[in-house]
Amino acid sequence: MAPSRMAFACLAIIAGAAMLAHAQDEHPIYELHGSGTTNPSKYFWKVMDMMEEQAKVPLFMTYRAVGSSTGQKEFVGTAENGFESLNHFGAGDIPMTQARYDQATQGGKEVVHVPFLLGPIAVFHSVPSGELPTVGIQLDACLLSKIFSREIKTWDDPAIMAQNPTLNVPANTNIKVVHRTLGSSSTSGLTEYLATATKDNTDTTCVWLESNTGSTVEWNDDETFGVFGSGGMAEFLADNDYAIGYLDAGHGHSLNLEEIALQNKDGRYLKSTDADISATAAVALTENRIPATSTASFADVNLYDLPGTNSWPITLMSYFYIRKDLTALGSTGTLLKTFIEFVLSEEGQTMVEEFFFTRLPTAVLDNNQATLQTLVTATDAPAWGLEGDSTQVYDGMGTFVLSKKRRAYAEVERDQMSNAITQLQTAVSGMSQTFELHGSGTTNPSKFFWKLMDMMEEQAKVPLFMTYRAVGSSTGQKEFVGTEENGFNQLNHFGAGDIPMTQARYDQVTDAGHEVVHVPFLVGPIAVFHTVPANLSSAAGIELDACLLSKILRRVITTWDHADIKALNPELNVPANTNIKVAHRTLGSS
């Protein structure tokens, strides 16, 4: 019978496949390592993941989120190593300080600042919502300066009430001022803004001293709270009422923190969500606040308190710190340039908005393109290409082509999961009631319970919150029974155990007027295991009857070569007088 015609999806294989694989396996691993600001770290990690997944040759790209100042230091290097970079690039939300720029440019070396995104720094608070004015809290730079310097200490201070007459806080409620410890670009942004905006104020108590600005400043440690990182700031604000602090606006809003409306240069009160951040950077360019030459020092560049109806007073511009001459980096130099080109591309700039940052205005992007043209790379380093949405037949399979047609399954799954979570969050946000169920008891089926609870939470149309504490059968019984002090009322919604409830506990519950139901739900064997090396026992393993097991557990029999054990296991060949190490559970256990 002739074979039926069938359509198959096939892999095309050529006779010389082994030779092709051998040639491709000779490619080295191309590496790129950066360090610096924590704010855009998730964005960097996503871009690096994408590039690794789209490459035909192995890439290994990392970014250490350690803060802008540390990123600068590791880019500059030390006197001991001749001020050679310890990273391939640094990144920061502040320009390189003049001192570090001078160190990095010793011996004729040239350093380039490449702006890549904008991030507003906002001031957040945790005054309870029921005490707030309808428009929220509004503060000008003078009041903000007095609050952070502890010149003003309570939320009902007359100066604050004058700007917020309907603020209704308890009398003399302390303002908990929280600040970042260690070097922080957010601290630099806040303090340099305060110094800029208050320097000409006739009320000298408003003025924030220029000498107390930068990534690390002096705080009144006895009356303020120090936290580590943006996460620590967000956590403090979430956990403490009547606090005030600062962090990048996107981070704060992603956690639903309450923002303070600040007064901009034009006298308008607004929140970062109402401002035009991109236009703020465009103003900086037109006012020549950004050097025309990318290799010049950017130490004095800032985007604080700029004019404009919709301008935001505390805007940070994030930079790559790179060497103009990348030839010493070899293939890493062209990979670095490709990485930066993607970040500055239309796709890369659109992606920054996923992380609550603002894309650069066209004028700054044009400047960047001119800067990238001046970079010097090794002549023998690979030039990287890109296959985008349009398929490039043949060329797309080039060795050094990053192809959007290549993806990792994990990336696809992450995207789907992210979309599902967004939909779930939207659905849950409109629901007012969460249905809870909490149990405790035996550890044995705990993973089964957790999986079942996860499934039920995912399948429900209303929000469920279900937990199970794996604490042992006896503890599960005790928490179900309750205590004499609470009238033997259960502390969990259900208990679970691999043993029935003891008579004493059953009596306690029923004597208190409750009825108890036992519902069997599974059968699980308990086995006895050993660690005698396999080559010392017979093929059938070790066999013990109940009598021998009892004697072993009670330590009547203490060695593996005991005559009674050997009688049942004649092929057991352990060293003479080998001690039996008896292990047992502590606490209550079924």
Image (cartoon, helix red, strand yellow):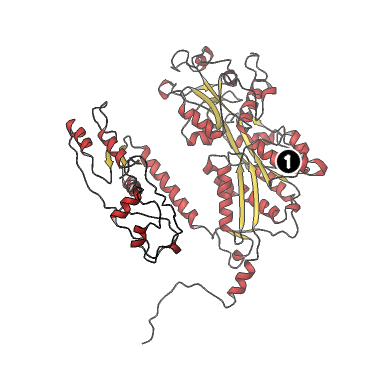
In the depicted structure, whether residue 198 falls above or below residue 21: above
Q: Is residue 506 left or right of residue 432?
A: left
Q: Is residue 408 left or right of residue 186?
A: left
- Tell me which corner region of the image, top left, top right, bottom left or bottom right, holds residue 403: bottom right
Where is residue 399 drawn, in percent x and y? 63, 64
Q: Nearer the viewer, residue 346 or 448?
A: 448
Residue annotated with mark 1: 76
Where is residue 281 drawn, in percent x and y? 63, 36
Q: Nearer the viewer, residue 445 or 158?
A: 445
Task: For residue 90, say whether it is visible.
Answer: yes
Q: Is residue 498 left or right of residue 186?
A: left
Q: Which quarter of the rendering shows the C terminus?
A: top left
Where is residue 432 drawn, in percent x and y? 33, 34
Residue at figure coordinates x 61%, y 29% from the top left: 187
Where is residue 197 drawn, in percent x and y? 64, 23
Residue at figure coordinates x 24%, y 30% from the top left: 488
Q: Residue furthest right?
A: 107
Three-letter amino acid code at disc 1? Val
Q: Nearer the viewer, residue 495 or 111?
A: 495
Residue at figure coordinates x 67%, y 23% from the top left: 212
Q: Is residue 459 left or right of residue 520?
A: right
